[in-house]
Amino acid sequence: MELSALTALSPLDGRYRAKVVPLAPYFSEYALIRYRVQIEIAWLQALSREPGIAELAPFHRATTDELDAVAAGFSVADAEAVKAIEVRTNHDVKAVEYWLRERLAANPEVARNAQFIHFACTSEDINNLCHGLMLSQSRAAVLLPALDAVIAKLRTMAHALADAAMLARTHGQAATPTTLGKELANVVARLVRHRERLVNVPMPGKINGAVGNYNAHLAAYPDVDWPGLARRFVEGLGLEFNTHTTQIEPHDGIAELCDVYARINTTLLDLNRDVWGYVSIDYFRQQLRPGEVGSSTMPHKVNPIDFENSEGNIGIANALLHHLATKLPVSRWQRDLTDSTVLRNLGTALGHTLLAWESCLRGLGKLEPNHARIAADLDATWEVLAEPIQTVMRRHGITDAYEQLKALTRGERGMNRDALRSFIVGLAIPDAEKTRLLALTPATYTGLASTLARAV
């Protein structure tokens, strides 16, 4: 079968292709080859600027411009040519080196210095820098904007619903009231904290040879400050220079990044399940979309499918992210190749992550609070005022305050206002305190919920 959205093995390249296509320029096979070409060209140019490498003179402006153009204009057709070379080399990075030699053969400056393409490099010198750029650039261009959209939507909802009192539930039972806005603000606060960590995870990089000691570099040019050149090169790419590695950069930065993405996903998983529950008890209703079907047999259904889709994709994403985080930093002795095939799943993990975030955002956009249903729940649970009453009693020295309210209210669903009023009137507390307690309702007993909701 011809490869298409309908025949693709992965749903990310099939059913969901349009939703995750922004990640393709960073994690596709074409993207990896393009990054390799960029790194190889940048390293060649860095070597040409190093005074200690006498055999490689600085390139003239025309050659530099041509090299820059090859890196910037690398096309899918170019990648296909590299793959054709890989068929005979059975080595993907070496294929890039050979392709560059062929592509630049007509340039006399490059042609007579072709031996400096991939000079003193092991494949991992190129690949680790590619992965660092793929992750850092996709984070800035795709993932952070998607996360910011979710945070912005939740913040808007938190502020709009800051005063919308609702019954809280602890252990699934009626509990001290809160507001819809405050509950959404809790998620905003968590995501903002995660976002800060996400932004600040550095992406390390190295270019120090077969076992990390610059062995071949020094064999060829013992007087060159290779660690200094390597640092300038790696930091010039926008990555953090790692001074101590084996053949591979140990991937601790990637592991840390995967952990942060997984933590964000877990927070949104928590939100998905809570909102799903609120939809099921009719605290939220979902906007109807013309033509949309909720069930193939039950015409009345309006299912919370976006939150379910988000939850399912988070499960897949986090399974991959957790594996990446625990597997990648482990390599036998100075190098084994188990990381190579695993690293190719970075895009898959982040594709399911992006899909989950966008599904959650779409679901949030459909929600409408059912204030009547929420108010009815509050009015049916006057027993939640046992907490403030017994707390005020404690303040004024009444012994066994908790026990008195426990006897009055525990397990008494449907406790009404009149029963509580009679209890309050009989209390030996100042009249001002009685007045304050008598004015309290489940809908007004929300503490600083409104203030906290607006504070995010």
Image (cartoon, rainbow, N blue to C red):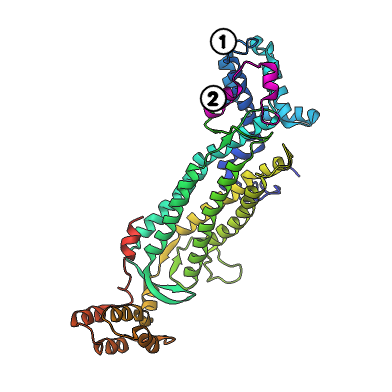
The answer to whether the residue labelled 1 contacts the one labelled 2, judged by CB atoms less than 8 Å apart, is no
Q: Secondary structure of the magenta portion, mostly?
A: helix
Q: Which residue is mark 2?
A: 232
Q: Secondary structure at mark 2?
A: helix
Picture coordinates of residue 389, whole percent (x, y): 31, 81
Q: Is residue 117 left or right of residue 64?
A: right
Q: Residue 407, located in which quarter of the rendered image?
A: bottom left
Badge 1 crowding class, 10 Å Cα cut-off, few under 14, some 14 to 19, many 20 or more, is: few
Looking at the picture, which amino acid does disc 2 mark? Arg
Q: Which residue is mark 1?
A: 60
Residue closer to the observer: 42 or 369: 42
Quadrant containing the C terminus is bottom left
Whether residue 327 appears in magenta in the rendering, the answer is no
Picture coordinates of residue 7, whole percent (x, y): 71, 48
Region in magenta: 210-236
Q: Is residue 25 visible?
A: no
Whether residue 233 appears in magenta in the rendering, the answer is yes
Q: Is residue 353 visible?
A: yes
Picture coordinates of residue 15, whole percent (x, y): 63, 51
